[in-house]
Image: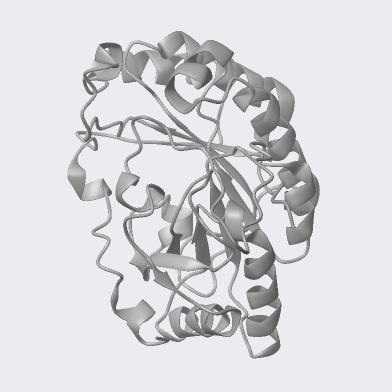
Amino acid sequence: MKCMLCPRRCGIDRDSGRGYCGESERVRVARASLHMWEEPCISGKTGSGAVFFTGCPLKCVFCQNQEIASGNRGRELTISQLAELFLVLQHKGAANINLVTPTHFTPQITAALRMSRSDGLCIPVVYNTSGYEQVETLKMLEGLVDVYLPDLKYYSSELSARYSNAPDYFARASLAIAEMVRQVGSPSFDDTLYGEKMMQRGVIVRHMVMPGHIRDSREIIRYLYNTYQDNVYMSIMNQYTPLVDMAAYPEISRRVTRREYEKVIDYAIGLGVENAFMQEGNTAKESFIPDFDEGMYLKEVL
């Protein structure tokens, strides 16, 4: 069957080949662990049960997870092994199941979620994505995903074409976010299980400020606030880190300055944004990049 899961619509038969994402139809997972570096209402005290899938339909030139996006890491799992992995993470105390870069494996993930729920999975499921999604693919997840955690990387089609080979990024991502909000509604929290404010349902839209492009960041924040007001949370990040050779992109070969980030935050505050996560201090460092050593929990199901 020709793959049309993401906006690339590459049409590759992934039973016998690999799509733009770099993956066949066989699920590959690069790491599974209790991840502490998400937003506080996702990681909590115990950590988010993060499952990092190999491959990526977007493949940004500055990718901070390039090691797995390029397909260099990952172990093949059957659907039943993936379902077992979700249950292992729940047993280890995960606050949720966090599906990281899952788009190209959506059919297999939905089957695994149904299987694991029938076997006792009861914690929220988080869909952690670049935002470059097909609405039709997201509809497969209705009733299975509780929290959507999409990026909204670019407003400008010129920037998205240059850095992600996706001039249609904003058009696709804005439609995807609308579908996510339709599915899960306004944010809701529960502080009874972990003793702190943990998101149970809702949408958190992430935006990473990029060096030299604060105008684009302002446009994104304006769009989100004018469209959704407080029905979505924003997560405005300053952790952009040029880890790969950026000689071809000298304009983004540095970190974001404190002043650039403050200008974006000041703009958000001036608009009236209240439901937002903001980063403080020097968060642009390699410690935010996971060590893709598979994690002990992946090994338990192999």
Tally of marks: 0
Compared with 101, 63 (above or below) is above
Residue drawn 71% across the image and 38% down it: 176
Query: Which residue is nearer to you in this view: 187 or 149?
Result: 149
Compared with 11, 106 (above or below) is below
In the rendered view of the protein, which quadrant contains the C terminus? bottom left
Residue drawn 33% across the image and 82% down it: 299
- Residue 75 image-quadrant placement: bottom left
**Res 217 visible:** no
Q: State the image coordinates of residue 164 (x, y, percent, origin top left).
A: 47, 27
- Residue 43 image-quadrant placement: bottom left
Report the side of 47 relative to 183 (left or right). Answer: left
Report the side of 289 relative to 23 (left or right). Answer: left
Q: State the image coordinates of residue 224 (x, y, percent, origin top left).
A: 64, 26
In the rendered view of the protein, which quadrant contains the N terminus? bottom right
Residue drawn 64% across the image and 69% down it: 108
Query: Which residue is nearer to you in this view: 149 or 299?
Result: 299
Report the side of 142 relative to 278 (left or right). Answer: right
Q: Residue furthest front?
A: 16
Q: State the image coordinates of residue 112 (x, y, percent, origin top left).
A: 63, 76
**Res 73 visible:** yes
How does the figure colour the protein chain or chains? one colour
Query: Which residue is nearer to you in this view: 93 or 189?
Result: 93
Q: State the image coordinates of residue 57 (x, y, percent, origin top left).
A: 54, 43
Query: Which residue is nearer to you in this view: 243 or 121?
Result: 243
Q: Residue furthest bottom?
A: 119
- Residue 300 image-quadrant placement: bottom left
Residue drawn 41% across the image and 53% down it: 40
